Image: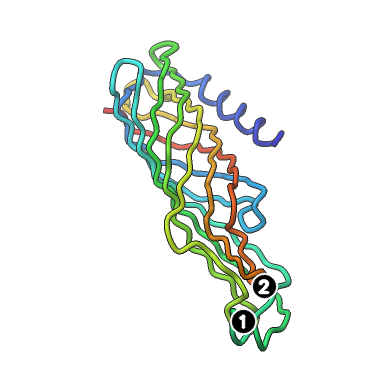
């Protein structure tokens, strides 16, 4: 957690040393780095994009899509048949998980001067998960993942500054917390179902935005 705060402070410092005019209506792209306590999603990373439209002089609406992924490996179980399980054995298992998150947020924004702005807000999101777990034999592991979208909500702080005064390009960054309520809970106790319960993700982004 300390490293994440240090990274957020570094992003803020980089933004503060730049100058130039800013726009409220933006199209942007960014890199995403995330951490959580979820066993299969400890430190996923990826990329995303967003569009921001002003609703008033101080309030923006932000539509974003982020895609992150994470790989993990360790001992697991593969079976010839599941529920009921038979023909099972222990193997080294590799799990690949990707999350696509579509979010909509309200972002009250304060312009501190002509070149720097900060926004604080939050909203809701829909997360689609694709996760596959295979043993070294190539068999599917004893594993259950969501097959439908999972709802969540988020809170964020965003920063923006224009590094080139004559171009409509801004350096942007954000720090956010994102909660996802995973609903893939299986009553059959012999099946491994890590996507059960609410997970808190801590997210940092840095990227570029085009203002118009």
Callout 1: 10 Å neighbours few (<14), some, many (20+)? few
Callout 2: 10 Å neighbours few (<14), some, many (20+)? few
In front: 125, or 92? 125
Query: Which quadrant would residue 63 be assigned to in this image?
Result: top left
Q: What's the residue at 41%, 17% (across, down)?
A: 115
Query: Which quadrant would residue 121 be assigned to in this image?
Result: top left
Q: CA distance from mark 2 to mark 1?
A: 9 Å
In the rendered image, the vertical position of residue 64 relative to residue 83, given as above or below: above
Q: What's the residue at 42%, 39% (across, down)?
A: 124
Q: What's the residue at 40%, 21% (across, down)?
A: 108
Q: Secondary structure at mark 1?
A: loop
Q: Secondary structure at mark 2?
A: loop
Using residue 58 as the reference point, say whether residue 41 is left or right of it.
right
Q: Which residue is mark 1?
A: 84
Q: Which residue is mark 2?
A: 190
Q: Earlier in the sequence, mark 2 or mark 1?
A: 1
Using residue 111 as the reference point, say whether residue 13 is left or right of it.
right
Contact (CB < 8 A) between labels 2 and 1?
A: yes
Image mark for residue 143: none
The C terminus sits in image quarter: top left
């Amino acid at each position: 957690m300390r490293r994440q705060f240090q990274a957020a402070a570094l992003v803020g410092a980089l933004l503060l040393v730049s100058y130039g005019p800013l726009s409220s209506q933006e199209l942007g792209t960014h890199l995403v780095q995330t951490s959580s306590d979820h066993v299969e999603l400890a430190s996923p990373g990826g990329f995303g994009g967003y569009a921001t439209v002003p609703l008033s002089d101080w309030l923006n609406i932000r539509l974003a899509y982020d895609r992150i992924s994470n790989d993990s490996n360790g001992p697991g179980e593969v079976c010839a048949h599941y529920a009921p399980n038979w023909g099972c054995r222990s193997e080294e298992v590799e799990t690949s998980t990707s999350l696509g998150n579509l979010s909509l947020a309200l972002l009250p924004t304060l312009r501190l001067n002509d070149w720097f702005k900060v926004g604080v807000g939050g909203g809701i999101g829909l997360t689609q998960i694709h996760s596959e777990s295979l043993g070294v034999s190539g068999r599917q592991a004893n594993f259950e993942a969501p097959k439908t979208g999972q709802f969540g909500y988020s809170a964020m702080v965003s920063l923006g500054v224009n590094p080139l005064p004559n171009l409509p390009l801004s350096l942007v960054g954000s720090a956010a917390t994102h909660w996802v309520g995973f609903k893939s809970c299986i009553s059959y106790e012999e099946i491994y179902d890590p996507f059960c319960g609410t997970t808190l993700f801590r997210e940092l982004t840095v990227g570029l935005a085009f203002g118009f």
